[in-house]
Image (cartoon, helix red, strand yellow):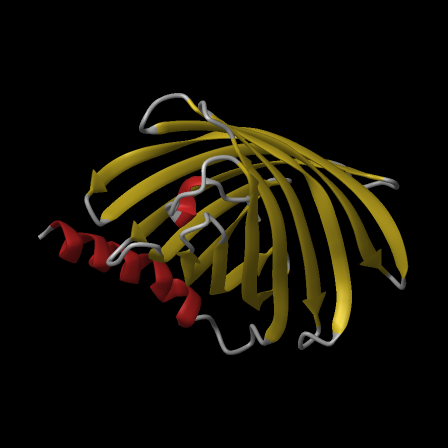
Amino acid sequence: MAEKTAIRLLMCLALPAFSARGEDRNVASLHQFNLLTQTMGKTRLMWHNRVRFFDGISDFYQFRTGPIVYYDWNERLQLLAGYYLLEQRSNGAFQTIQRPWAGAQYRIWKRDKASVDWRNLLERHAYSGPGDFTRFRSRAVVNLQPKAGWQPYASAEGLALQGHVVGRYAAGVNYATRQGHVIGFGYEFRQTVGGPGSHFLATLLQFQIKGPRRREKPGEAEAPQ
């Protein structure tokens, strides 16, 4: 019964992404490469890197890099904070963006092979030119783990910025190896303020470079998009 409930929730969260409007035709891609340090205590450290392409996955748009710290307050509550340094194309030129952020993720429901997490983050986007803004984001994600290492997921997220609220909807699957490395592939639909939405193909390659070697649950250390 619990697994069926989680599957229904997963489908409900993923549905808006796959039923996007016809005019939302821009296809883009996100590619993550992360290095994770797993400590013996409650803290994890990650160095996050991501490349983003747009216009039919034909043009480079953005590169970002930066550290992330995770702290497991208890079995349900995780605190996380990070800093991204971005280089982004804008009107044919590149601009630098700094993005410090912090927040928490709480496991609101859990069974042996399924869980539901709720994450809230506050971010500051500081540009090398004008346009700075603060953004709040709140996400619900359903994780399934039918077999060791495998984790299908679906999420829905609301982002509040500059007097507007937009949505992001994602679905995909991650796989954790016995050495703690994670491989992932997914799809995401993003709404934008004052424009059409975008369809994203997303890939993840994450290596555990230090710490106890064991099969990890893929969702235990995740870089917010």
| In the rendered image, the vertical position of residue 13 relative to residue 85, given as above or below | below
Left or right: 133 in relation to 4: right
Identify which residue, 111 or 56, lies in the foreground. 111
Quadrant in the rendering for residue 69: top right
Instruction: Give the residue drawn at x 45%, y 36%.
Output: 212
Instruction: Give the residue drawn at x 22%, y 53%.
Output: 6
Left or right: 106 in relation to 207: left
Left or right: 90 in relation to 192: right
How many marks do you count on the picture?
0
- Give the x, y percent position of residue 170: 44, 59
- Give the x, y percent position of residue 179: 46, 49
- Give the x, y percent position of residue 130: 85, 40
Instruction: Give the residue drawn at x 48%, y 40%.
Output: 221
- Give the x, y percent position of residue 120: 47, 34
Identify which residue, 54 or 39, lies in the foreground. 39
Instruction: Give the residue drawn at x 43%, y 37%.
Output: 119
